[in-house]
Image: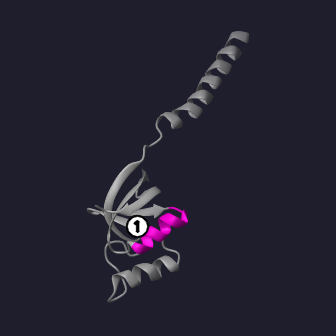
Amino acid sequence: MHFVALKFRLLSLTLALTTVLIPSSFASEAHTFTGIVTDAMCGAKHMMEGDSVACLRACVQKGSKYALIVGDEVYALDTEDKAALATLDQLADQKATVTGQANGDEIEVSSVSPAK
């Protein structure tokens, strides 16, 4: 009976360590994405008639995140960095290069710059 308890503890410890170590070994790396700056609410097609930049800025002021259209994909841009947000605002409806970690359809932004 004592042997079974010891075996169970070793198995539990192994599982606990695996749970802690696996996420760090599979952490996604930063990638660079180039596309058109938009907002997550409208995506590729702005809902307001007329000026797409005005629509984008209105949506962001109402709480929508900036987004990046890359080919057929629209990625919401997750950042609270004021410099990155200012650059995204300046590049509204223009081509930009965003560096960050993608997680599904969202990118955790580490930097933003005009596309070359």
Relative to 50, say whether 56 is above or below: above
Q: Which residues are magenta?
A: 79-90
Question: Quarter holding the C terminus?
Answer: bottom left
| 47 inside magenta stretch | no
Question: Quarter holding the N terminus?
Answer: top right
Relative to 97, say whether 36 is above or below: below
Q: Is residue 1 visible?
A: no
Q: Main secondary structure of the magenta part?
A: helix
Q: Residue at x 54, y 66 (%)?
A: 82
- State the colouring used for the structure image: one colour
Q: Residue at x 53, y 75 (%)?
A: 63
Q: Residue furthest bottom?
A: 50
Q: With 72 as the anchor, is 75 left or right in this view?
A: right
The three-letter amino acid code for the residue at tag 1 is Ala
Q: Is residue 16 visible?
A: yes
Relative to 15, say whether 56 is above or below: below
Q: Residue at x 48, y 40 (%)?
A: 27
| 86 inside magenta stretch | yes
Residue that label 1 marks? 67
**Label 1 crowd (10 A; few <14 / some 14-19 / many >=20):** many
Q: Residue at x 40, y 67 (%)?
A: 67
The quarter of the picture where residue 4 lies is top right
Q: Residue furthest left?
A: 71
Image spot of residue 34 (x, y percent) = 31, 59
